[in-house]
Image (cartoon, helix red, strand yellow):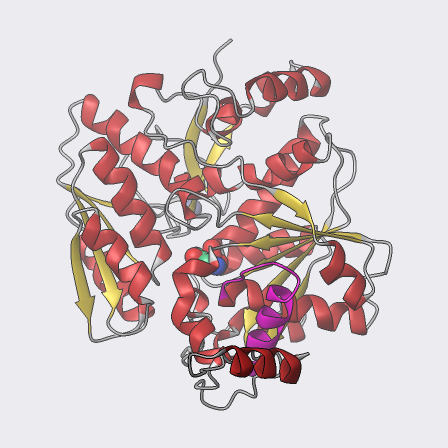
């Protein structure tokens, strides 16, 4: 059975184009695009049959179906030929019961989805694999793509450069100078991307990339490109699969450009359409208080949405003031009875360190999500028995400077309540014993 998918306007204009068409906005209304699927055809297979198929493929070796994304190929990009799929076995990340952390804040059923345990260290791999596969499909059809380009707060560029290098396709990444972590910067450099560090912020890089892709030989990899969202939505399917096909009560994600919160929602909606789940979870989007346009809109009942100039935040991957997917995110949040929370620098740093004390090693964006969780438990929005899934978006090892700064009390304006400064000692056993005693 083959299924169909296509590009369409997310605002409802009546047209359809091939997924391989190089176009990012609706020619009629200027709105964002989305990928449409033939849901009627997909529904001809029962929910139970889909679950069986996905379980048969999950984490197995038959290429490319062992990938958490490509195991759901029919729901993602059915038309891509398998020889064009560029997969590094993305997805399949662990979902674990954060027992001690949960108990310490009064939750019995708190789970962390470790999306950062991935090839390039963030969830971005889920979407980039789909996008770069589409590029290979375009190139194999004779389309003259010179390079794939993106603006990035660090993780998109890391992922894009890895997948492009794996496929032998050139990539160009535009980064805000001194606003991403050294680990994130060295990734595209190592993978051979043309790496451009600019004297501006993410929003400035994005504006330049939009100019660059007026030349259609430069293919756009930012999440304005709906192919990314198609891959990212599989995280929801994978979470439900990991619970033997049961939907949780809450899912919390950090929000910057707001593509991911929209993607997470789409994954659940698709499962509901295919009779895989009956109920939808509630969604929470957590923003840094220094880059919080969605939070401000939420306070206003989503009546308006005003971009802000994002201030510096330790959660650098979500330091975005003018999120491209704002409209998609708002419509998803409305459908999921959604909540938006925010976290100050002090709150996110402490929440991150507190979680680390229970065995995690959290990135600052995950710190934002954790701080939001603490607030929602405190104000009883989230109940003690609710099953809560917290999506950790990047590997903490990408943000070692943040960790070192916290524990050595070097982060300006932050009181390191959970700091654990290393003790420097002379080389003798009495000093060692003394230090252990003093610490205990
Ligand atoms: C990209 C990114 C986000 C934000 O995702 P959006 O889709 O831009 O909202 C959050 N955390 C990390 C680690 C990221 O790389
Ligand atoms: Zn339109």
Q: Is residue 389 above or below residue 414?
A: above
Q: Is residue 5 above or below residue 268?
A: above
Instruction: Specify the segment rendered in magenta.
Output: 344-363
Lateral position of residue 94 relative to residue 383, left or right: left
> Image quarter for residue 309?
bottom left
* Quadrant (top left, top right, bottom left, bottom right) of the C terminus: bottom right
Lateral position of residue 315 relative to residue 200, left or right: right
Q: For residue 345: magenta?
A: yes
Query: Which residue occupies 70% across, 33% down?
Result: 272
Answer whether residue 307 is visible to the viewer in this image: no
Q: Nearer the viewer, residue 342 or 363?
A: 363
Residue 21 at x, y percent in the picture: 29, 33
Query: Which residue occupies 46% across, 70% down?
Result: 315
Q: For residue 326: magenta?
A: no
Residue 321 at x, y percent in the picture: 43, 72
Query: Which residue occupies 72% across, 35% down?
Result: 243
Instruction: Please identify the residue farthest to the front as the structure is shown.
Output: 429
Residue 160 at x, y percent in the picture: 29, 46
Lateral position of residue 52 relative to residue 121, left or right: right
> Image quarter for residue 81?
top left
Residue 154 at x, y percent in the picture: 34, 60
Q: Nearer the viewer, residue 284 or 103?
A: 103
Query: Which residue occupies 59% across, 53% down?
Result: 391
């Amino acid at each position: 059975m083959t299924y169909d998918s296509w590009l369409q306007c997310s605002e409802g204009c009546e047209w359809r184009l091939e997924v391989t068409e190089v176009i990012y906005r609706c020619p009629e209304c200027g709105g964002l695009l989305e990928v449409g699927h033939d849901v009627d055809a997909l529904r001809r297979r029962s929910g139970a049959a889909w679950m069986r198929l996905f379980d048969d493929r999950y984490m197995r070796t038959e290429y490319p179906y062992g990938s958490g994304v490509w195991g759901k190929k029919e729901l993602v990009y059915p038309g891509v030929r398998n020889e064009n799929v560029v997969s590094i076995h993305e997805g399949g990340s662990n979902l674990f019961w954060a027992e001690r952390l949960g108990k310490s804040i009064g939750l019995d059923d708190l789970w962390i989805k470790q999306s950062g345990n991935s090839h390039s260290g963030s969830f971005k791999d889920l979407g980039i694999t789909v996008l770069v596969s589409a590029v290979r499909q375009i190139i194999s059809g004779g389309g003259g793509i010179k390079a794939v380009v993106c603006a990035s707060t660090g993780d998109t560029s890391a992922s894009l450069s890895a997948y492009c290098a794996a496929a032998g396709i050139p990539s160009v990444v535009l980064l805000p100078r001194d606003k991403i972590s050294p680990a994130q910067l060295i990734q595209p450099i190592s993978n051979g991307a043309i790496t451009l560090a600019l004297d501006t912020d993410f929003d400035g890089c994005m504006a330049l990339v939009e100019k660059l892709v007026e030349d259609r030989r430069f293919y756009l990899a930012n999440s304005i490109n709906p192919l990314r969202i198609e891959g990212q939505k599989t995280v929801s399917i994978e979470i439900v699969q990991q619970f033997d096909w049961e939907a949780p009560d809450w899912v919390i994600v950090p929000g910057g450009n707001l593509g991911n919160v929209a993607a997470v929602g789409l994954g659940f909606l698709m499962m509901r359409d295919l009779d895989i789940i009956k109920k939808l979870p509630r969604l929470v989007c957590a923003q840094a208080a220094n880059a919080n346009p969605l939070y401000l809109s939420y306070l206003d009942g989503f009546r308006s949405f005003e971009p802000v100039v994002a201030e510096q935040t330790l959660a650098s991957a979500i330091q975005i003031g003018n999120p491209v997917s704002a409209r998609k995110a708002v419509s998803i949040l409305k459908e999921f009875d959604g909540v938006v929370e925010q976290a100050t620098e002090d709150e996110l740093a402490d929440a991150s360190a507190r979680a680390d004390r229970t065995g995690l090693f959290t990135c600052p964006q995950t710190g934002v999500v954790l701080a939001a969780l603490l607030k929602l438990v405190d104000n009883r929005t989230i109940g003690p028995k609710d099953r809560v899934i917290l999506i950790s978006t990047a590997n903490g090892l990408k943000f070692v400077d943040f960790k070192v700064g916290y524990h050595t009390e070097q982060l300006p304006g932050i009181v390191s309540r959970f700091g654990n400064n290393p003790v420097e000692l002379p080389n003798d056993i009495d000093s060692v014993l003394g230090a252990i005693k003093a610490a205990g």
